[in-house]
Amino acid sequence: MGNEEKLFDDDENWLHEEWIVCPACNQSLFRLDASPLDNSNHFYADRCPVRIDVIPYGPEYEQLEQSLALSQDDKEHSYADYRGVLMRAIEAHLKPCTCGGMVRHDAPRRCFSCSLPVISDDPDGVDLYPDEDAFERELDPQRQERLERWQAQFLPHLENPWKGPSETES
Ligand SMILES: [Zn+2]
Ligand SMILES: [Zn+2]
């Protein structure tokens, strides 16, 4: 019985949602693990809080995967290693952030107010949001507008996140 209750509790918060506070400016921030249902890879700028999502298909992505020349067997036997290699390969082919910083899957997660790192230890797979509004189905117009402003600034939709061929030759 006790065990069942515990399991239920874990299920309720399976993405480890938690409110945290920026130690530098006291801004409240909402952290959670990237959902396994979201198949995009999340990359963060290493100088600012901007996040770039990369979908795991399209010619650039598939070419990168092929260039790593790993067999299905490799992928299954050391998935964590494979993912690390793939993430690094993707990073090398992504455009830098508009601030000039590189985008990396394991860059520290930064506060949206003061830009200082809030999650530096093992940030891979963790996302920060200003609040839970990004996960609401319907928002009143004011909150919707605030969410869209945040997305435009920190989660920009890029038609093409990839560098041009000439920029990756070196
Ligand atoms: Zn940036
Ligand atoms: Zn802050």
Image (spheres, helix red, strand yellow):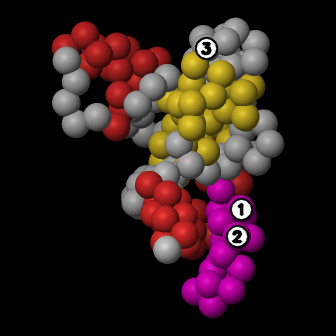
Choose between 108 and 57: the one closer to the eye: 108
* Residue underneath mark 1: 84
Q: Which residue is mark 2?
A: 80
Seen in the picture, residue 58 relative to 111 is either above or below; the reply is: below
The secondary element bearing badge 2 is classed as: helix
Residue at (42, 18) in percent of width and height: 150
CB under 8 Å between discs 2 and 1: yes
Q: Earlier in the sequence, mark 2 or mark 3?
A: 3
Above/below status of 51 relative to 81: above
**Which callout, 1 or 3, points at the residue further toward the start of the chain?**
3
Q: Characterize the local packing of mark 1: few (<14), some (14-19) or many (20 or more) Cα atoms within 10 angstroms.
A: few
Residue 148 among magenta residues? no
Which stretch did the figure color magenta? 68-87
Identify the residue at horizontal 49%, vertical 74% (top origin): 1
Q: Is residue 82 visible?
A: yes
Which amino acid type corresponds to the residue marked 1 in the rendered image? Gly
Q: Label the magenta part by its dominant secondary structure.
A: helix
Residue 78 image position (x, y, % from top left): 71, 80
Say which amino acid is labelled 2: Ala
For the residues labelled 2 and 1, the Cα–Cα distance comes to 6 Å
